[in-house]
Amino acid sequence: MKDYLKLGFTAPKQLYKAVKMSRKQLFYYFALLSLIVTVSMASLLMNVMGNLKEDGQEITEKLPSFEIVNDKLVTEEETESYVHQTESFLFFFDPNNSIQEEEIDSNVERLNVPIGIGLMDDQFYLNIMGQSLPVSYTQLDRFTDSNFKDIMQDMGRFSPVVLIFTFVVTYLASSISLLYEWLIIALFANILKTFSRITLPFGKIARMALIALSVPTTIFAIFETLGLFIPYTFEITLGFSLYFVYRSLKAYIDKQKI
């Protein structure tokens, strides 16, 4: 594991050595990169925690009565969908299926709000610093507006339960986001492999792609921890990672010729 860490951060030209990674090492490396992103996101969340209680109270004051029944959000009276913004939250209440996930994501990014919350007709949707986490209502049966108000009131308290909940949710969101980036990079890297006429299975190329994520993922995590938000982070990460993979594939070809 130590050798692959050194490889990812100091010798991206030799990524081809990652083809020897075991599945266990691959899992641990992915978990480590997810943790790096999580620490960055969690530190930002801690910075805004002071405003969460007041902002959460502001949101819940307007919240209609509702209950999750048969995996659907049901209101006591006919209620229109609406959006409420505070300094810390961008809250979407949508029992009418009129708001899409993409709309939440784009508005969170455009308005530079740390947390986006969507109580939608068929799912609970959370966006933390651009990282999305949809939760099916099958896991929240009989969940009511009172339960939601209790959670929002506890958000501003630094209790062990809140801290653990924040870490777990943030880690899940980070893992899903990282998995998406890894898959996209691995697919493009596989195309590069095909053009280079290298006979390596997709699983080996995917290992190289994960190691290639190390530097850009860590750099952007550090920037976000310092409160510096850089646009087009995914595109930049994709570009650098594929460049590292390309350089490594060339080195692999040169090695095979020796």
Image (tube, grey):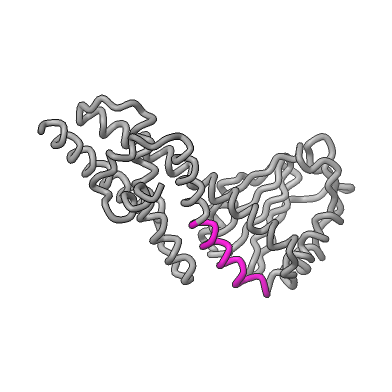
Q: Residue 205: which quarter of the image?
A: top left
Instruction: Residue 247 in the image: state x and y as whole percent.
Output: 21, 44
Relative to 182, 151 lies left or right = right
Q: Residue at x 67, y 74 (%)?
A: 50
- As for residue 219 lying within the magenta part, the answer is no
Q: Residue at x 76, y 62 (%)?
A: 152
Q: Nearer the viewer, residue 100 or 18?
A: 18
Q: Is 80 drawn above or below residue 224 in the view shown?
A: above
Q: Residue 128: which quarter of the image?
A: bottom right
Numbered marks: total = 0
The rendered magenta stretch, by its main secondary structure, is classed as: helix
Residue lying at the far front in this picture: please name it: 2
Q: Residue at x 32, y 47 (%)?
A: 241
Q: Residue at x 44, y 40 (%)?
A: 26
Instruction: Residue 39 in the image: state x and y as whole percent.
Output: 54, 61
- As for residue 41 lying within the magenta part, the answer is yes
Q: Nearer the viewer, residue 205 or 110?
A: 205
Residue lying at the far left in this picture: please name it: 258
Q: Is 17 drawn above or below residue 60 in the view shown?
A: above
Residue lying at the far bottom in this picture: please name it: 50
Q: Magenta span covers which residues? A: 36-50
Q: Quadrant of the C terminus?
A: top left
Q: Nearer the viewer, residue 27 or 212?
A: 27
Instruction: Residue 32 in the image: state x and y as whole percent.
Output: 48, 51
Instruction: Residue 101 in the image: state x and y as whole percent.
Output: 60, 45
Relative to 116, 14 lies left or right = left
